[in-house]
Each structure stands twice: as structure tokens, then as C-alpha cells.
Image (cartoon, rainbow, N blue to C red):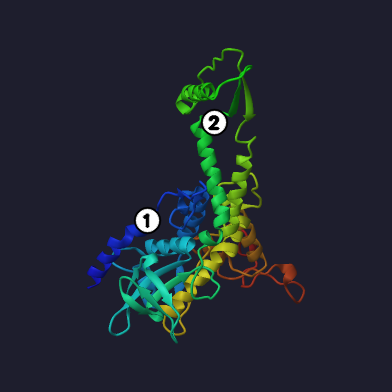
Amino acid sequence: MLRNLFQRWIGHYPTYGIMLPSTDRGGMPSVTPLNALYYTPVYRACSLIAQDTARVSFDTSDAGVTSILDAPNRYMSGYEFRRAMMLQACLFGNAFALINRTRGGDLLELMPLDIESVSLDVTGPEPYYRTRQYGDVQMRDMFHLRAIGLDGLWGESPVRLCKTSLTIMAAQEQAQLEVMRNAGNPKLAIVHPGPLSAGARQSIAEKFQSDHGGAENAGKPLVLAEGMKVERISSTLEDSGISAARQYSIADVSRIYGVPVTYLGETTNAYGSMEWLSRMYVDACLAHWFAAFRAETLSKLATVAASFEFDTDALVKPSLAEQFAALRTGVESGVITRNEARAKLDYPPLPGLDEPIVAKNMGTGGGASNLGSDTSAEAGTPNDF
């Protein structure tokens, strides 16, 4: 039965595959959650959030949660499952996975669902999900990862909420594409000294476009006759403001998703050290997604009184010199032992370094030595880690 259900899910998958942007009646690109990844700043922001959330390790006291998140089903790894769920939540505002349990109530599988096939019915005394593949599903049997939403039950798509900003970015990209199709040539006006009929004007324009339009005609000499001359109306992308507008749009995507603008490849406004940027990225962006994933896990998958935490040490790590300086301070002040400092650096412990060091000027009773019987220079050297 499970195999048949999963085959139905796979058969329905292409309905929300990535689609190229179309244009509306006004000629503006139409940006939707289905095609938002077509634009590189959105792709970078969403892929960073999805992949970083998926790659960090987690600590939980529930063995069942560990097992189901490491191997959610026979078709996906835990990393692939968490990455797909986070990517869908970033684009659509919601991501769904059916929770399959054994008759005894043990966790069996997490089956991702087609986003567009799930709705939430709140007309009755207790909300429940309507699904195309599995019928009505109670809330306790649906793993629902959601973005911020007004009612707390349904997430709002960041792409739809900020569609105006993303449409402007898409229009800028389309304009830049048209300029590059013309080999980056500026917009020109061909001025004739005498009057020209409509047919003559059309003929001159078509001839110029045929001979000099497109990248394949870049560098061709321009030959004019009858006293005609060329005047430039606009020049480079910088003169027309597209470059500055593109930078602003990248910053807009940064504001939408909380990913530092430097992480999106924009370096003109870069500021702060990498450690500071990574801490801002974790605190202002990933921490909220971690909290949403943690809350749903504890609510739907874990047993009562279970714990679940993400380990963000891999995401925020200072330089080696900064780590050594901080650990040295901790060792010399007696806060940590030298072996504990070595453990922070993933170094193996050494004999005789398990006692804390207390500086003589920090002791009592006329000055104290290191804790322990040996007060020689060998035992009291704080640099031995």
C-alpha cells in the first residue's frame, strides 16, 4: 500500500516543478513560488537556508525522532528530506509530510506531499488537512513546516507577500537581457538632415537592426550616407541605472529572507567580519527556521518531555587565531581545563591536563598556585594545550 501511495506522489511531482517566468498583459515578468528560483539572488538565499538547515546536526533524547529524521523513508536521506522541506517552506510558505505510524503508534515514515494538493479545513471544531493523495488527515498525522502566517496555522509565501519587489528585480533582469542581446550597444538615434517618408525611416531602422543588432554583429563598422549622423540616447548599463538597481534588488532579497547581502554575492556593501556575519545569519535568519522545525518535531514526532536542539557550532566558527586567544583566556582564568580547551579544537586529551589553572595573583591567602600538588613551571604553563 505504501509503495502504491508513494508512486502516486511521484507521478504528481511535475505539477510543481520549476517553471520559467512568463509575462503578464503589461509585459512584466510574473514571479511566483514556482519560478522564483529562476532568479539568482532568490536561488542563493533559499538554497542557503535549505542546505544549512539540513546539514547541521541535532541532539535529541528521543531515539524514535533520531531514527525518523535520519531515514524518513526508503526513498530519501534525512538530509534530502530536511532540505526539500525547508526549500518548499521558503518558496511556498508551507511544506507537508504525512506521518505514517505502526498500529502500535511507533513512527514509520515521513512522506512528503505535493504542496498544491494540501489544504487546511478550519470550518469544524477541530482543523484538519484535506489531501489529494490520502484524503482527510488529522493535524497530529501531518508534519507541517510553515513560514510566518497571520493565523499561525498556515504559512504565507515570502514570494507572494513580496511580489512587487521580486517583480521589479525580474524586470531589471529582463531589461539587462535585452541590452545584452544587442551586444551591450547603447540606444542610438540616426539623424537625417532632410525629411524622410515613413517607409524610408522604416527601411533605415530595419537595415541598421539587421546589420548591427545582436551579439554576432558586435564590432561591425557603421557606414552612413547622405549626411546622416548618429546620436547616443543612452549609454551603458551603469548610465541607465540598471547596475545600481540590481544591487538594490539583491539587498531586497536579503531583507526578505534575512540572509546577509554578502552571502548573496553582493560585496560593494560588505561589512563586518565573517564570524560577525555568520552570527547575524544564524540569529536573524536560521534561528527562526530552527525554532519552527523544533516546535513541529516536538509536537508531532517526539514523546512527552523529549528534548530537541540544533547544533549551530558548524555554522558559526571564528578563525583559529581567535579560538586560540579565547581558549587561552579561559585556561588562564581557570574557567576551563587545558584538556577541555583541546576538546574545543577537536584535539585528543593529554595526561596531566585535567586540572584547572589558577594564576597566583588570583589566589587567596597571600597568593595561590595551580590547583594540584605540582607548582613547577612545567605544571603551571598555561600554553600546554
Question: For residue 341, which numbered disc appears in the image?
Answer: none
Q: Residue furthest top?
A: 226
Quadrant (top left, top right, bottom left, bottom right) of the C terminus: bottom right
Quadrant (top left, top right, bottom left, bottom right) of the N terminus: bottom left
Q: Which residue is mark 1?
A: 17
Looking at the image, how many numbered discs can be counted on the residues?
2
Q: Amino acid at mark 1?
A: Gly
Figure check: 225 above or below 263: above
Q: Mark 2: few, some, or many residues within 10 Å (few <14, many ≥20)?
A: some
Please state if 211 lies on the left or on the right of 194 as rendered. Answer: left
C-alpha gap between disc 2 and disc 1? 33 Å
Q: Residue furthest right?
A: 366
At x 74%, y 71%, the residue is 367
Q: Amino acid at mark 2?
A: Gly
- The numbered mark, 2 or 1, whose residue comes first in the sequence reads 1
> How far across and how far down the image is residue 174, in percent?
51, 42
Q: Which residue is mark 2?
A: 184
